[in-house]
Image (cartoon, rainbow, N blue to C red):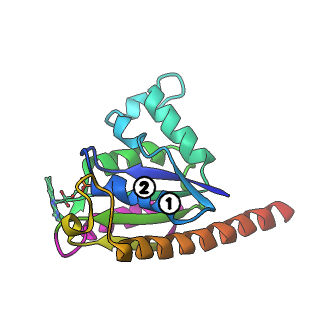
Amino acid sequence: MWNVLGICGSLRRNSYSSGLLRAADRARPDITVLGAELAGRLPLFNPDLDDEALLPDAAREFRACADRCDGIIIATPEYAHGPSGATKNAMDWLVGSSGLAGKPTLLMSSSPGQAGGMRGHLALIPTLTLMGSVLVDSVTISGAPARTDGRGDFTDPDVAQRVELALREMSAALVRSERKASQALLR
Ligand SMILES: Cc1cc2nc3c(=O)[nH]c(=O)nc-3n(C[C@H](O)[C@H](O)[C@H](O)COP(=O)(O)O)c2cc1C
């Protein structure tokens, strides 16, 4: 059983990003998506607060959840061809922790447009690799309004299938990362 931190980069009610995280949570019995509400509660990152004595409660909870989790799923909107500010802010809070190192990480997005939010992933990739994430093939879903129920839940079975496929890869990557960690312990 794997616990994966869900980072939702949208604060919007009925957001497609939160719908994708719910779809990921439903996709496989061996993966549970936790903490999807935490990124939205973070204050704006301020290095002055990145100190054990001053760390805001929301940031402490978010980092603790990242540390405990075996992998990460980031579901981000694409805003002006980049990731949302909420997504970038969550990344900034994680830089000072070891929450991503060696962990399988899946990027997901959905938008009404034909690129499905994929340009929102691009600027995140160098940051994620710098932080030691092990990237899994990402999911982008175009034409979102016709594939959802109006509350952000995906009703298109093809979307469920694509999410399931990505989560299957995530599961295999989690097994590989656990094997690597136990081999490192034996050395
Ligand atoms: C300020 C703003 C900028 C946006 N820029 C883009 C964009 O560059 N490309 C795109 O495909 N969609 C863009 N969109 C549409 C979002 O992808 C769409 O609102 C999406 O549903 C956001 O994700 P969410 O449903 O999780 O909130 C933009 C939306 C807003 C509000």
Q: What span is in magenta? A: 113-136
Residue 49 falls within the magenta-colored stretch: no
User: Residue 26 bears which disc, if any?
Assistant: 1
Residue 108 placement (x, y as % from top left): 37, 65
Residue 134, horizontal then vertical, whole percent: 54, 68
Which quadrant of the view contains residue 121? Answer: bottom left
Residue 174: x %, y % from top left? 63, 66
Q: Above or below — where is 35 with respect to 116? A: above
Quarter the C terminus occupies: bottom right
Report helix, strand or loop for mark 2: helix
Q: Nearer the viewer, residue 19 or 4?
A: 19
* Apparent side of residue 129 relative to residue 168 in the rendered image (left or right): left
Q: Residue furthest right?
A: 186
In the visual, does 85 lie left or right of 50? left
Q: Type of residue at label 1?
A: Arg
Is residue 134 located in the magenta-colored stretch of the structure? yes
Q: Nearer the viewer, residue 68 or 156?
A: 156
For residue 182, side relative to residue 86 (left or right): right
Q: Amino acid at mark 2?
A: Arg
Element on which disc 1 rests: helix
Q: Residue at x 43, y 39 (%)?
A: 38
Q: Would you name the residue on which mark 2 appears?
A: 22
For image coordinates 20% across by 71% down, the residue present is 143
Q: Are marks 1 and 2 in contact (CB under 8 Å)?
A: yes
